[in-house]
Image: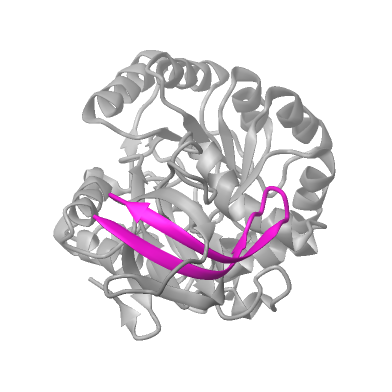
């Protein structure tokens, strides 16, 4: 199938160049040609001639199947219900301009069901990379979601079992978090040897691995062992950030979820206090990461549909808007290892486009919600709403 997308401004976030009045020719869901406008916009084509075009956003850390609030109660629901929640949040992500989601953990591989539903056209949603249930120690952070494993032999077997199941990447929880009631935010929850074992297994299988950690000793162990991404990292130290730069470790910035947990009246007092402290410290950490040139991607976690909030946070941390948008597009694609497929608007890549009424390089953050979303050449959102 061939279609023409007539664009007002195509914004190249890598070079900063804006290309005016371009036609993007899409063939079988991929960008086949980018040329100067020619002819008319025919039936079956898309007219975005008054709009600004970017590649689709990448939400590099999400949990589609639950929301901010009582996580234990939500994740204890029947897996069928969790799949429905995942479908709802996939739609929310799509509306915000997200065309790819890296789902960082769900109970019972329910993310596999959501992914299949999206791929088979049963529900509208972004492209989905699924980690399945995360791996944590018995009683560790998010124990109610993942596979509790203790000791080198057990974590090795769990990692291998998940790789056998077909996870797109491996997710481990190596220290505490805001919603943990048994340990502190930076308390190590796995041994150095356990962390090294799981990283080895993921990399041996050719898969990337991300570690939930806000800091502390476990973050150092994970970085030293070659983890691909630190997820969150609200209390990372100068030494750890320097180590990340040296090792090429990604930082996935998730500021909005800390704020959302802090502000959720229904959350326990300890959760709100821990998230508030993490949020208060986070800006200085990310500011230093920006100064050091650490590779950044952004994620909404369960603060669904709020990529614009993460872009605004990166700006507060010292990034220019173009760099912040690049983190939310090519950054996420590169972290996922699919930068040859998505992340920029280049010939041969998936036709993932989002269109704005105002220039996203200068618009207020609240305006960074697209009016059109196209994923692999299919219109998923137009000014009327979501297209199934």
Residue furthest to the front = 39
| Residue 302 in sight from this viewpoint | no
Residue 38 image offset from top left, x and y in percent: 47, 66
* Magenta stretch prevailing secondary structure: strand
Instruction: Indicate whether residue 81 is drawn in magenta.
Output: no
| Residue 24 in sight from this viewpoint | yes
The residue shown at (34%, 43%) is 130
The residue shown at (59%, 18%) is 225
Please give the range of residues in magenta: 1-28
Q: Does residue 160 lie above or below 288 as drawn? A: above
Residue 219 image offset from top left, x and y in percent: 64, 32
Q: Quadrant of residue 21?
A: bottom right
Q: Quadrant of residue 105?
A: top left
Residue 144 image offset from top left, x and y in percent: 33, 48
- The C terminus lies in which quarter of the figure? bottom left
Instruction: Indicate whether residue 2 is drawn in magenta.
Output: yes
- The N terminus lies in which quarter of the figure? bottom left
């Amino acid at each position: 199938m061939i279609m023409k997308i007539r664009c007002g401004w195509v914004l190249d976030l890598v070079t900063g160049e804006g290309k005016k009045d371009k036609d993007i020719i899409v063939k079988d869901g991929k960008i086949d040609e980018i040329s100067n406008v020619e002819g008319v916009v025919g039936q079956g084509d898309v007219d975005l001639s008054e709009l600004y075009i970017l590649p689709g956003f990448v939400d590099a850390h999400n949990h589609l199947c639950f929301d901010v609030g009582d996580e234990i109660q939500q994740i204890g629901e029947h897996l069928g219900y969790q799949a429905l929640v995942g479908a709802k949040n996939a739609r929310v992500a799509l509306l915000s301009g997200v065309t790819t989601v890296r789902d960082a953990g769900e109970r019972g591989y329910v993310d596999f069901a959501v992914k299949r539903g999206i791929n088979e056209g049963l529900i509208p949603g972004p492209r989905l990379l699924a980690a399945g249930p995360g791996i944590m120690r018995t009683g560790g952070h998010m124990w109610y979601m993942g596979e509790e494993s203790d000791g080198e032999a057990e974590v090795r077997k769990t990692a291998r079992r998940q790789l056998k199941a077909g996870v797109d990447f491996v997710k481990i929880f190596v220290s505490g978090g805001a919603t943990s009631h048994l340990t502190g935010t930076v308390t190590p929850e796995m041994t150095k040897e356990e962390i090294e074992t799981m990283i080895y297994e993921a990399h041996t299988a050719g898969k990337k691995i991300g570690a939930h950690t806000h800091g502390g000793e476990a973050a150092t162990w994970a970085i030293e062992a070659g983890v691909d991404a630190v997820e969150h990292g609200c209390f990372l130290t100068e030494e750890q950030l320097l180590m990340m730069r040296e090792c090429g470790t990604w930082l996935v910035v998730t500021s909005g979820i800390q704020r959302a947990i802090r502000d959720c009246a229904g959350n326990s007092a300890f959760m709100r206090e821990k998230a508030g402290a993490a949020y208060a410290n986070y800006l200085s950490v990310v500011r230093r990461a920006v100064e050091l040139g650490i590779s950044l991607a952004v994620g909404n976690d369960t603060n669904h549909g709020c990529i614009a909030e993460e872009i605004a946070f990166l700006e507060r941390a010292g990034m220019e808007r173009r760099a912040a948008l690049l983190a939310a597009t090519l950054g996420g694609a590169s972290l996922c290892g699919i930068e040859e497929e998505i992340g920029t608007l280049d010939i041969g890549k998936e036709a993932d486009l989002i269109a704005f009424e105002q220039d996203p390089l200068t618009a207020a953050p609240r305006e960074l919600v697209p009016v059109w979303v196209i994923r692999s050449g299919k219109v998923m959102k137009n000014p009327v709403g979501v297209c199934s």
